[in-house]
Image (cartoon, rainbow, N blue to C red):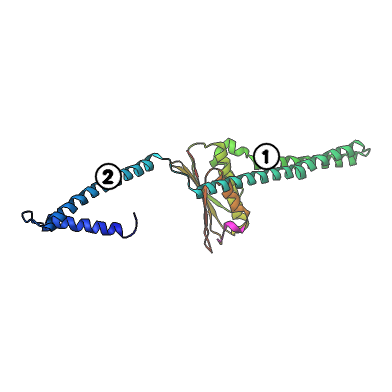
């Protein structure tokens, strides 16, 4: 029921009840008393019926609220879909990079070694033979370095040997900017999680070296209450933004595969802090 009718009916019932309980003189017989008594009885019956109906409706809504599964919000579904798409794109880009590095790096150098060995086979001059063999040896060393770098880019051996904290420590030693470490990780995590966090930390330290102009940096690692938290900061000029390059987006895409998050705090004139969090049992 909508409109003024329910209000008028409610007002009439309340007026009748007020008359019956506070103004009625039971010993006096009049048409007004009879009408008020009849209307009050009807009002009480209507209130009782409405109360039963409202109670049933409230009980049904409470049962649905407690028993029915809550549907996932559309925004969360879109966020997960976008994060999975970003992970697939990042994986495809990583495979293309590996293919390009193999083709342009190790494969090209192996071909060069084969050519040098062919030239050495036809050499009659001992001095020329030694020169060609030295060149082949040098190219072989470069090819080996390329393959090691490629393997390290896929999964660093130090990550398997020393765990996440040890791998981050090794990465910090290679950073030209002095890095202060505060690593508190008491147990090994799942290998995919360790790999994602390691590469995120390495990418963050690379950004510090290339873009921050910092004189020092710091890395904090914690694992508390099922959440892995990694903070990489520097005292550089600040101004880091997600839309300013691919570095921060790449870190965010890595973390999104594990339902992780990236918070960027980088006001002008610094300091800059990247706070990465991953749910991790």
- Residue in front for this viewpoint, 208 or 62: 62
Q: Residue at x 58, y 53 (%)?
A: 248
Q: Residues within 10 Å of mark 2 (few under 14, many from 20)?
A: few
- Looking at the rendered structure, the number of numbered marks drawn on it comes to 2
Q: Which residue is mark 2?
A: 52
Query: Which residue is the extreme one toward the front?
Result: 31
Q: Which residues are magenta?
A: 238-244
* SS for dot 2: helix
Furthest residue to the right?
A: 124
Which of the 4 image quadrants contains residue 104?
top right
Q: Seen from this angle, which residue lies furthest bottom?
A: 268
Q: Is residue 87 above or below residue 267?
A: above
Q: Position of residue 279 (x, y in %)?
A: 49, 42
Question: Which image quadrant is residue 84 in?
Answer: top right
- Label 1 close to label 2 by CB (< 8 Å): no
Question: Is 17 placed above or below 268 here?
Answer: above
The label shown at residue 151 is: 1
Sequence-first tag of 1 and 2: 2
The answer for how far apart the CA atoms under marks 1 and 2 are is: 73 Å
Residue 60 point in image, percent of width and height: 35, 42
- Image quarter where the N terminus lies is bottom left
């Amino acid at each position: 029921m909508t409109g003024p009718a329910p209000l008028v009916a409610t007002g009439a019932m309340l007026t009748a009840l007020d008359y019956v309980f506070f103004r009625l003189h039971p010993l006096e017989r009049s048409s007004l008393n009879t009408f008020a008594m009849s209307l009050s009885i009807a009002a009480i019956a209507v209130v009782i019926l409405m109360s039963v109906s409202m109670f049933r409706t409230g009980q049904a809504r409470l049962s649905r609220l407690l028993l029915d599964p809550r549907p996932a919000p559309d925004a969360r579904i879109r966020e997960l879909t976008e994060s999975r798409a970003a992970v697939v794109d990042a994986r495809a880009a990583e495979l293309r990079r590996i293919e390009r590095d193999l083709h342009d790096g190790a494969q090209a150098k192996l071909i060069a070694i084969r050519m040098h060995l062919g030239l050495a086979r036809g050499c009659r001059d001992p001095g020329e033979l030694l020169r060609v063999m030295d060149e082949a040896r040098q190219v072989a060393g470069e090819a080996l370095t390329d393959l090691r770098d490629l393997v390290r880019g896929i999964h660093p051996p130090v990550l398997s040997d020393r765990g996440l904290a040890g791998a981050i420590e090794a990465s910090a030693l290679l950073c030209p900017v002095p890095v202060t470490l505060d690593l508190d990780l008491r147990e090994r995590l799942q290998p995919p999680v360790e790999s994602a966090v390691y590469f995120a930390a390495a990418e963050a330290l690379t950004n510090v070296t290339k873009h921050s102009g910092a004189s020092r940096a710091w890395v904090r690692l914690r694992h508390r209450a099922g959440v892995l938290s990694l903070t990489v900061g520097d005292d550089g000029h600040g101004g880091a933004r997600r839309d300013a390059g691919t570095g921060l987006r790449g870190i965010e895409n890595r973390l999104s595969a594990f339902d992780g998050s990236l918070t960027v705090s980088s006001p002008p004139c610094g300091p800059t802090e990247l706070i990465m969090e991953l749910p991790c049992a």
